[in-house]
Amino acid sequence: MELNGFCVKYGIEGQQIFLGDALDILNKIPNESIDLIFVDPPYNIGKDFAGRKDKWKTDEEYLSWCFQWIDLCINKLKPTGSFYVMTSTQFMPFFDIYIRKKMTILSRIIWSYDSSGVQAKNYYGSMYEPILFCVKDKTNYTFNSDSILVEAKTGAKRKLIDYRKNPPQPYKTEKVPGNVWNFARVRYRMEEYENHPTQKPISLLERIIKASSNPGDVILDPFCGTFTTCYVAQQLKRKFIGIEIQEEYFKIGLRRLGIAKEYKGEKLEREQKSYEHKELQEQTTLSFAF
Ligand SMILES: C[S@@+](CC[C@H](N)C(=O)[O-])C[C@H]1O[C@@H](n2cnc3c(N)ncnc32)[C@H](O)[C@@H]1O
């Protein structure tokens, strides 16, 4: 562990995570040093991040804060780098207008998911979150389309044959995904679940990291939450820099990434979920019954 006055840093070369404020730490990262940046910031919609409110006094204040870290992220990206950024549906148009003056927006992605929680009855409930995929140089960026292919749904029962080819060949059954992505939200009973209100699914980050980086590349996430980006980067042999301001979530990162087993004398163990606890109790009761 290193204490720099403004943050705490953990990890080894190529696998570094910081506890501190994103703007402070972004300012210390060398310019043009990062291959891929994924940003899933607070959305200004009133979530509770371990006691830190996700709500600014005015929309203008929220946007002016966002534009500061967006500018920093753009500076930190290599000329060949890619930038994926999320926010709530209501703020994404402002991000789009701001960013398209500085980068090329190649895709406006919809992360669509099934319903959960209370359903809206008097209007159309929100079932997606937007993601912008942007690059600095549209003629020179990484896009490993072969590593993210999905099954092409033709609707046909039999294999379609392309008679334009000589000899005729079956049509390819795989394609590069379009800009509507269906991945389930992370729910309490899922194996990957951590105690965080807006954890992103591993599958979502896998697609982004496989497509827009290569093994050994450096990936940055300035608002890590449960450190999903760093976790997937580690699995896929990429280097990473992760930042999170809340100690409770930072501890999840230390454990999830296998960087530390203890923090300030506290053992870092996964919280046992209440239903697992209940199931364990039931098993114990059953074994006593026999
Ligand atoms: C939307 S969540 C990120 C969730 C993450 N993508 C995941 O998969 O778990 C945003 C995170 O940013 C953190 N955060 C808020 N303000 C911050 C700041 N100024 N610097 C660094 N992190 C901050 C919050 O504590 C929260 O965990």
Image: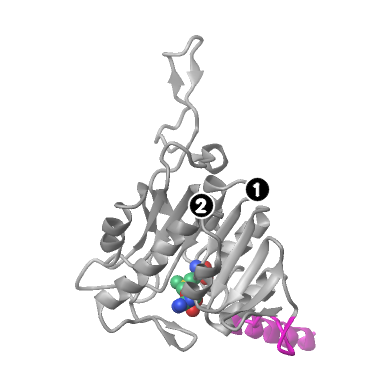
> Is 262 located above or below residue 69 in the figure?
below
Tell me, yes or no, whether the highlighted magenta stretch contains residue 151: no
Specify the label residue 215 is tagged with.
1
Give the x, y percent position of residue 289.
76, 88
Give the x, y percent position of residue 124.
24, 66
Name the residue located 66 percent from the left edge and 71 percent from the top edge.
Answer: 256
Query: Does the beta carbon at disc 1 come under 8 Å from ligand 1?
Result: no
Instruction: Sort mark 1 into few (<14), some (14-19) or many (20+) by Cα contacts within 10 Å.
Output: few
Q: How is the image coloured?
A: one colour
Name the residue located 49 percent from the left edge and 86 percent from the top edge.
Answer: 50
Q: Quadrant of the N terminus?
A: bottom right
Q: Nearer the viewer, residue 59 or 119?
A: 59
Alpha carbon separation for disc pair 2 and 1: 13 Å
Q: Nearer the viewer, residue 182 or 248?
A: 248
Range of residues picked out in magenta: 262-290
Q: Residue reaching furthest left?
A: 122
Q: Is residue 155 visible?
A: yes
Give the x, y percent position of residue 48.
43, 84
Q: Quadrant of the C terminus?
A: bottom right
Q: Is residue 199 left or right of residue 289?
A: left
2 vs 1, front mark:
1
Q: Which residue in the structure is indicated by mark 2?
A: 208
Q: Secondary structure at mark 1?
A: loop
Give the x, y percent position of residue 280.
70, 83
Q: Secondary structure at mark 2?
A: helix
Name the residue located 78 percent from the left edge and 84 percent from the top edge.
Answer: 287
Q: Nearer the viewer, residue 128 or 83?
A: 83
Question: Tag 1: residue type?
Answer: Pro
Tell me, yes or no, whether the highlighted magenta stretch contains residue 274: yes
